[in-house]
Amino acid sequence: MKWCFDTSALIEPWVRHYPPDLFPGLWDALTTLAEAGVIGAPVDVKIEIERQSDGLCAWVSSLSNFFVNPDRATIEAYARIVNDYPGFLKVNSTKSGADPFVVATAEIFGVPVVTYETMAKKDVAPKIPNVCTALGIRSASLVDVLRAESVKF
């Protein structure tokens, strides 16, 4: 895996920026990158996406090599991140808690996190870019991935 995707890096492009009915080539390219193991995400991202039964849910379900289960090192990194960054895991949230797993997975693989989240303001719960910056992990956009992987249409 060269890029670790957050849920927002799939939902935002699918719904708002690059819907598959207008940009089918993009989603074909992402499928190819996923199946080649170039892009990936922790399985908790899939859990968040599966809460909506829609086209994105169907697309991620079709990917056989995109989602990774946490190993011991990832679980240990997850525990450290949750302890070191209070508020990063929202205990009473309806989300699966994928964000700490996204950061932990990226840290273990030594890869950037692909996200549409932006930095949280000071004195509020941290977001993925805040924690990534603190840990020295690069945050990237989908366009960064496409450029780095020479995806063109």
Image (cartoon, rainbow, N blue to C red):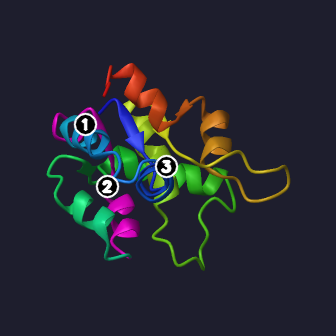
| Amino acid bearing label 2 | Asp
Q: Quadrant of the C terminus?
A: top left
Q: In this view, does 27 lie to the left or right of 126?
A: left
Count of number-bearing discs = 3
Foreground of the two, 48 or 111: 48
C-alpha distance separating marks 2 and 1: 14 Å
How far, Cα to Cα, is label 2 from label 3?
11 Å
Which residue is at a point 60% across and 29% down the rendered structure image? 136
Residue 37 in the image: above or below residue 88: above
Of callouts 3 and 1, the N-terminal one: 3
Name the amino acid, label 3: His
Q: Nearer the viewer, residue 127 or 56?
A: 56
Residue sticking out furthest to the front? 22
Q: What element carries label 2?
A: loop
Q: Which of marks 2 and 3 is in front?
A: 2
Query: Which label number is shown at residue 29?
Result: 1
Is residue 142 in sight in this rendering? Answer: yes
Mark number displayed over residue 21: 2
The boundaries of the magenta stretch are 34-51
Q: Position of residue 62 (x, y in %)?
A: 16, 58
Residue at screen point 14% across, 52% down: 64
Q: Is residue 111 visible?
A: no
